Amino acid sequence: MHTGKADMAKAKNITFFCKECGYESSKWMGQCPSCQEWNTMVEAPVKGSAQTGSHNVGITGISGNAPIRFSQIDSNSEDRYTTGFGELDRVLGGGIVAGSMVLVGGDPGIGKSTILLQVCANIAASRKVLYISGEESPGQIKMRADRIGNMPDNFTLMCETNLNTIDSAIRAEKPDAVVIDSIQTMYCETSDSAPGSVSQVRESTNALMQIAKGLGITVFIVGHVTKEGVVAGPRVLEHMVDTVLYFEGERSESYRIIRAVKNRFGATNEIGVFEMCHEGLREVLNPSEYMLEGKPSGEPGSVVVCLMEGTRPIMVEIQALVCHTNFGMPRRTAAGADYNRMNLLMAVLEKKAGMQLSGCDAYLNIAGGLKVSEPALDLGMVMALISSFRNIPIPDRTIVFGEVGLTGEVRSVSQAKQRVAEAVKLGFEECILPAACLKSVGDISGIRLTGVKSVSELCRK
Ligand code: TYD
Ligand code: MG
C-alpha cells in the first residue's frame, strides 16, 4: 500500500492555496484550476483540524442559531449612512450599510488610503471611527490628514498589525466604522504563516468578519492588487466580503474610477469618478465632459461612444491608429478595451467590408483610463478603425453606440433612449446607432439619428 501526496498533506495539515484567487487544494498544481493562473499555488499550514478551523464559522460569526420563520425576520435592519461623497454612495448602492464589510482594492499608490481617510473625516462628523494602519506611522497619517482638511475629534487612529490587539481595541472603543489599511500587513497569532500570505489574509479577514457581523461595525479593508508579488491579492477575499470596490485609472494621471465589482446591497458595475488633487480626491460630477476633455477635432481615428456604466450614461473617446506593418507579424494592442474583441472586429471588417487589415498594425485606446467591457463599444471600435484606415475623420459632434455580430450585423443595445438623451444634453448633433434601436428611441429633437444595419452598410456611407 502506498500513501498519496494528498494524504500526506492532510496528515500534516498542509493545504495549497492560489495566491491570486484563494482556490484551495490538497495537492500542488502548476496552474490554478479556478483562475487559470500559472505558478500561483503556495503551500500553507492549516491550523488544527477542519472541524475546529475558523473557516467553518458562518458569516454571522455566531454558530448554533436556530431556524427562524421568514416572516419574523426584520427587514428594516438595513441601516445606511452617507460617506460624504455622492459618487461613492451611488457605487455602494445608496451609502454605507452598517455592519457590512467593504473591500477597497487597487494598485499601490492609487489613492485607497486617501479616499478612506476622507470618508473617515466625513463619517466622524457624526459617528465614531477607528482607522487602523499597518503601513504608515501616526505622523505620516497626520500629514496626509492635514492636506485633506480637519479631522473631527471622533476620529481615532491606531498603528498596529496584530489582530488580537486590534480586536480588543475595537471591542473597547466600540466605533461605528473601522478601516484596516491594509489587510496584507495584518496577522493573526493563531496562524504561523507570514503576513500577506494567503492563509494569513484569510484568517485575518475571518477574524474581522466576526467583529463586523457580531458587533454591527462597518469594516473597510484595503487590499493591494499584486500581479506577481509575494503577497496574496484581494481576490482571495472577494467572496468573503459584502462589497468589493476596485480603483481603476493610471497613477500618472489625475482621474480615478471606483467600480463596484460585487455588492450584496446594490447594483454592480456602478462607477464613481474622482480626481486626485492637492487636497485629496474630489468627485467629478460630470464625467462625460471630463472624459472628452482634450479630444482632438477633425482627426481620423477618433470617435465618441456613449456607454452605460450601471445606471448612468457616460461618453468616452475611443482612438484607433491603423498603419502598415514593418514586420511580418502585425502588432495589435487595446488599452481599456478587450483585445480579443478588437481582433474579432478586425476580422469582421476584413471579411465583410473588404478592408485589408491583415498587413496592418492596429492600436486602440480608450481615452480617460476607463476599462470598458460593454458590447455597445463595438460600433465605436469599428468606426475608429475604419476612420483611421481610410484616413477620414468622423465629424466632431457625432456619437455612436451598438453591438457588432460575427456576420457584420449591427445589433441593438439596451437603454438606447437614455444614451441618446445624454448625447442631446451634451450638444451632439448626430447619433449613429443600430437601426433596431430607432423604434425604442422614438422622436427626440435636437439630434439627427442614423440607424445602421450592418458594417458593410456603414462602410458605404
Ligand atoms: P494613497 O492613498 O497613499 O495610495 P494607496 O493607499 O492606494 O497606496 O495615495 C497616494 C498618492 O496620492 C500619492 O502618489 C500622492 C497622491 N496624493 C495627492 O496627489 N494628493 C493628496 O492630497 C494626497 C493625500 C495624495
Ligand atoms: Mg495606502
Image (tube, helix red, strand yellow):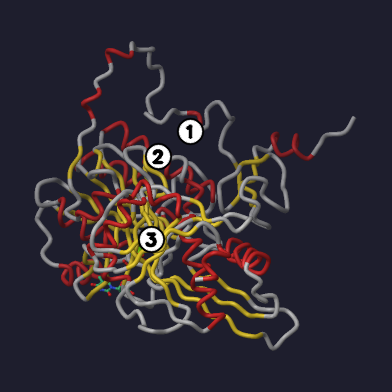
| Tag count | 3
User: Could you say whether the residue bearing mark 2 is in a helix, strand or loop?
Assistant: helix
> Is 422 on the left or on the right of 61, as rendered?
left
Q: Is mark 1 within 8 Å of ligand 2?
A: no
Q: Which mark is residue 247?
A: 3
**For discs 3 and 1, the disc positioned in front in the rendered view:** 3
- Image vertical order of residue 329 relative to residue 217, above or below: below
The kind of residue tagged 1 is Ser
Q: Is mark 3 within 8 Å of ligand 1?
A: yes
Q: Which mark is residue 207?
A: 2
Alpha-carbon distance for marks 2 and 1? 8 Å
- Image vertical order of residue 166 relative to residue 283, above or below: above
Query: Which picture quadrant has residue 254?
Result: bottom left
Alpha-carbon distance for marks 3 and 1? 30 Å
- Residue 178 in the image: x percent, y percent? 26, 47
Q: Earlier in the sequence, mark 3 or mark 2?
A: 2
Q: Earlier in the sequence, mark 3 or mark 1?
A: 1
The kind of residue tagged 2 is Ala
- Residue 107 in the image: x percent, y percent? 43, 65
> Is 432 on the left or on the right of 123, as rendered?
right
- Image vertical order of residue 60 relative to residue 106, above or below: above
Q: Which mark is residue 54?
A: 1
Q: Residue at x 75, y 82 (%)?
A: 328
The extreme right residue here reads: 1
The kind of residue tagged 3 is Phe
- Image vertical order of residue 107 relative to residue 362, above or below: above
**For discs 3 and 2, the disc positioned in front in the rendered view:** 3
* Ligand number 2: quarter of image: bottom left
Task: Look at the image and tell me whether residue 228 can be seen.
Answer: no
Q: Residues within 10 Å of mark 2 (few under 14, many from 20)?
A: some
Question: Of residues 239 and 164, which is closer to you in this image?
Answer: 239
Q: Residues within 10 Å of mark 3 (few under 14, many from 20)?
A: many
